[in-house]
Structures are given as C-alpha cells and as structure tokens.
Amino acid sequence: MSLTIQNPILMPGANLIGAEWSAAADGRTLNVCDPATDEVFAIVPDSGAADARHAVDVAHAAFATWKKVPAKQRAQIVKRWNDLVVAHVEDLGRLISREQGKPLAEGKGEVMYAASYIEWFAEEATRADGDVIAAPVPGRRMFALREPVGVIAAITPWNFPAAMIARKIAPALAAGCTVVCKPAEDTPLTSLALVKLAEQAGVPPGVLNIVTASRERAAEVVDVWLDDPRVRKMTFTGSTPVGKHLARRSADTLKKLSLELGGNAPFIVFDDADLDAAVEGLMAAKFRNGGQTCVCPNRIFVQDKVHDAFVEKLAARVSALVVAPATDSAAQIGPMINARAVDKIERHVNDAVSRGARVVAGGKRIKSDRCPGPNYYAPTVLVDVDATMECSCEETFGPVAPVTRFSTEAEVVATANATPFGLAAYFYSNDVKRIWRLADALESGIVGINEGAIAAEAAPFGGIKDSGYGREGSRYGLEEYMHIKYVCQGQLD
Ligand code: NAP
C-alpha cells in the first residue's frame, strides 16, 4: 500500500510567515524521518529566533484587521478550510501515517477528527455573543462584550499531528485571533499541509503563520514567543514538565494559557461490569495510536472476582493485534514514533518484571521481515502490577496494558486518585449508584463510563491537577481565545 502524496502542493517544505513560504532565515534545515524505517523522506526549515520574531511581527500587524472581520465571514473561511481538509482526507491521512507511523485507517480517521473541530468552531464563531447586564442603578446601560485576545502561540506534540493543531487554530481564527505556531520536530509535515489548505481557504496573509524547528531549537523559537508581550495567549499540548516551564516563563508577560498535558489514566473494571464490553473499551482506549495518546489507560484495575477471566480475554485480543508499518493494509499497531519512545517502553516493562510483574502477552521489541525497522514493540499485557512500578507512576506512551487486582471500591478510588495527574479516567460497572459515586469521586477532567472512546468535538477536552488547565472543543473551547470586556454607559436619564 502506497503512502505517496498525490497532491505535491500539500508538502510545501517551508515556513509560512505573512504571505511568504520561506526557508529559515539562517538557512538551517530539519530532516523528517519515517518512523517505520528511520529513513529521511522530507526536509523542512529548522527555524530560529529570527523566524519566530518575524512571525509575531506579521501576526500582530494582521490582528488589527482580522479582529474586525465580521464573525460570519470568518466562519465562512474556517468552514471552507474544513471542506478542503475533508476533500484531501486521503493525502492528509497518508502524510500522518508516513511521518507519525499510525496505520492509514487511523491516519484518515484523525483527519476527519481534526476536521470535526474545524467545522465545529466555524459554527461556534457566529455564536460568540456577549450579554446585556441589568444595571443596578438608573441611567446606565451595561454590557459584557467578547473580544479576541490577540496573537496566539500554539505549540503541539507529535502524536496527533492534525488534530492537535486543528483544535487550537480553528477556535483562534474563529474568535478573531491571529496565530503563530510550531509543530513537533517529528511531525511537521501534516501541520504545514493544514496551513497550506487554510491559505487556500482564504485565511488572509499574516493571520496564520507556521515555523518548523528541530528539538534543539524548539526552546529558541518558543522563548521568543514567551517573552514577547504582543503574544497574548499560549496554547500548548505536550508533556507536563514543558507545560510547567511555559507557565513559569510566561509569568512576566501574564499571558493567558491553555495547557493540555500528560495523563496517567486509570481504567477500572468492577465485578458487575459487562466484561466483553470492558475488554472492547480497553482495546479501543489503550491501543489506538499504539498507546501513544494522552488519554489512554495507563493503569488498569480489575476486581478480584473477574480478574482472571478479564486478563484471559484481554491477553487473547492483544496477542492477535497485527503490528506492521502503515504501508501494510493489515496493520493495527504501527511503529513507535522514535527510538527514545521504544527505550522508555522497554524500561517500563523491564522495571515491572524485575519487581514481580508477569508478562502474559508481548513484552519485547519486534524485529521481523514484516517489521524490519528499529521502532516496533509488541502489544503487551502485564499482570501483578503494583503502584511502585515505573509504569504505574508515569505514562508509558506505548502499547502496554499493566493490570492490577483490587478488592473494594474505596481502595480502588483511593489508588486511582493517588497520582499528580488528572486527565482521563474510565470505569466499567452496571451498578447505577456506583456509577454516580465514581463519576463524582474520580479526580479527572474527563470520565468515561462504560465507554472507551470519549473524545468528540462537541465535548470539553482537558485535565486537572498536573494534566493542566483549559478546555479544547465544545463551546468552552472558544472562550479560551476570547476575553470579556465590560462596557458601561452612564448619564442616560
Ligand atoms: P513535549 O516534549 O512536551 O513536546 C510538545 C511540544 O513542545 C513539541 O512541539 C516540542 O518540540 C515542544 N517543546 C519541547 N521542549 C520545549 C521547550 N523547552 N520549550 C518550548 N517548547 C518545547 O511532548 P511530546 O513528547 O512531544 O508529546 C507527548 C506528551 O504530550 C505526553 O505527555 C502526552 O500525554 C501529552 N499530550 C497531551 C494531550 C492533552 O490533550 N492533554 C494530547 C496529546 C499529547 P519538539 O517536538 O521539537 O521537542
């Protein structure tokens, strides 16, 4: 199966700053590798501080006019962007699979998922109404008006190269903000393609700007945006340490922040659950994108009575998963993003086994005729996992399902909440009273009840505690890009 891009316009291989697609100011370049082989297949700019500053200059200049474009007109442009993204689903899916490694069905699925956010915010743009406030004294009219916050800096990770950037840029444009953005080193191509399509949709020059950079230069680019008072908001998806760094470093310019950070999601199966549904839910939530998702279950707790039956069913399903490059039409799990990712997975599994966990499926790297590249790891199930093991304390970010046995509801709720993170939590139960007790008790921004696929454009996505703050998607997602201005007119009587 070919991942060749049919429409070469989708691979501009350059930054967009203002109206110009250009190289980095100092001419440096970044190689983009195929995670299935580690071979270089594209080159993009390795941008630095000068490019970052130039992008803010043009975004700041463009804000003066873009914010005055009527919401309906902005909505029409964003809607055209959605239409173009949907029309290019095949090529965009191939691009995602090529640079990120996920199977093509998932790559195309991500394109449609990204488009759903773009369409949603095109529609929300026209409903960003303010309020007329009942004045407490005579002779006054009082209003709460919504205004775009200004220039937005968007920084995104590699695991969903289309969706992460779409759900930041679409609400920003819809709200009337202008944007500077930097995608992850591993996956710059999908973002460039999306920006190309936004340009074709009629987003005016300067309103949407993108610079690509290597991991070594990421901080150089982002520091410029952190320090520049003209950048009024930073929206970041990535790891908790980098998110905390951005929060600290942006304090001097008091930027508005949205931080979508790491998770350590519990997945709890009670004795009264539908076991088959729980296994299916776990397969969807855990193994999508090879387990490289922030909301994927990282700690699986199964109650005594159903533990062995659940593990047996799970191990059978996991052992049957097909691991292969995205070019293989049977692939269900692709390569991990890079060597560091595979090293971390291996470290977590070895640590767990050295402390008493048992491997009941997978548990090793894969190197075979079907998977000749260096970045494959077998889908894995571990049992007898406890809270001291590395895989219980931090995201493994790979296809590893670590299972822990529990006895009581009180015990499992305490253990599930005993983490600094709070992004997603899942549980399976058919006891209606327990369902609402758990929905209240779990410390998490998102709770999936008898459901493993929780993300949707209409739903507020985001965490609490060390998983960050701010919400993406839903009507709340637009508010992140607007502030409220109170206007009071007196002397009216
Ligand atoms: P990361 O290392 O924090 O990188 C995220 C972005 O920040 C990338 O663009 C990266 O550039 C950039 N970056 C790295 N160091 C930086 C620095 N010192 N200053 C400024 N920017 C910097 O995270 P990742 O490993 O790519 O992504 C995985 C993480 O994202 C996981 O923790 C996952 O849970 C989280 N995530 C969260 C959500 C959510 O919605 N909550 C969604 C998806 C992923 P380079 O790529 O060039 O390093």
Image (cartoon, grey):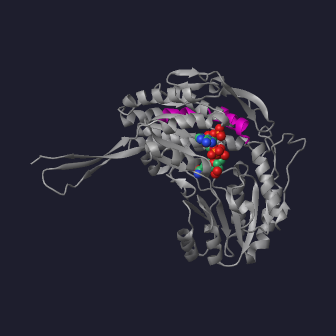
Quarter-wise, where is residue 214 in the image?
Answer: top right
Residue drawn at 60 percent across, 30 percent down? 192
Residue 408 at x, y = what percent? 66, 79
Residue drawn at 81 percent across, 46 percent down? 376
Residue 457 at x, y = what percent? 53, 49
Q: How many marks?
A: 0
Residue nearest the observer in this picture, 161 or 451 = 161
Relative vertical location of residue 101 with respect to residue 64 in this rendering, above or below: below
The reply to whether residue 111 is visible in this rendering is no
Residue 174 at x, y = what percent? 44, 38
Residue nearest the observer in this picture, 163 or 42 = 42
> Magenta segment: does it hold 94?
yes
The chief SS type of the magenta part is: helix
Quadrant of image for the N terminus? top right
The reply to whether residue 464 is visible in this rendering is yes
Quarter-wise, where is residue 88 in the image?
Answer: top right
Q: Give the side of residue 255 with respect to residue 364, left or right.
A: left
- Toward the front, the furthest residue is 252
Ligand 1 picture quarter: top right
Quarter-wise, where is residue 331 in the image?
Answer: top right
Q: Give the side of residue 404 with respect to residue 479, left or right.
A: right
Magenta segment, which residues?
A: 78-101
> Magenta segment: does it hold 83?
yes
- Toward the right, the furthest residue is 369
Q: Give the side of residue 392 with respect to residue 223, left or right.
A: right
Residue drawn at 66 percent across, 64 percent down? 267
Residue 54 at x, y = what percent? 51, 26
Q: Give the side of residue 406 with respect to residue 260, left or right.
A: right
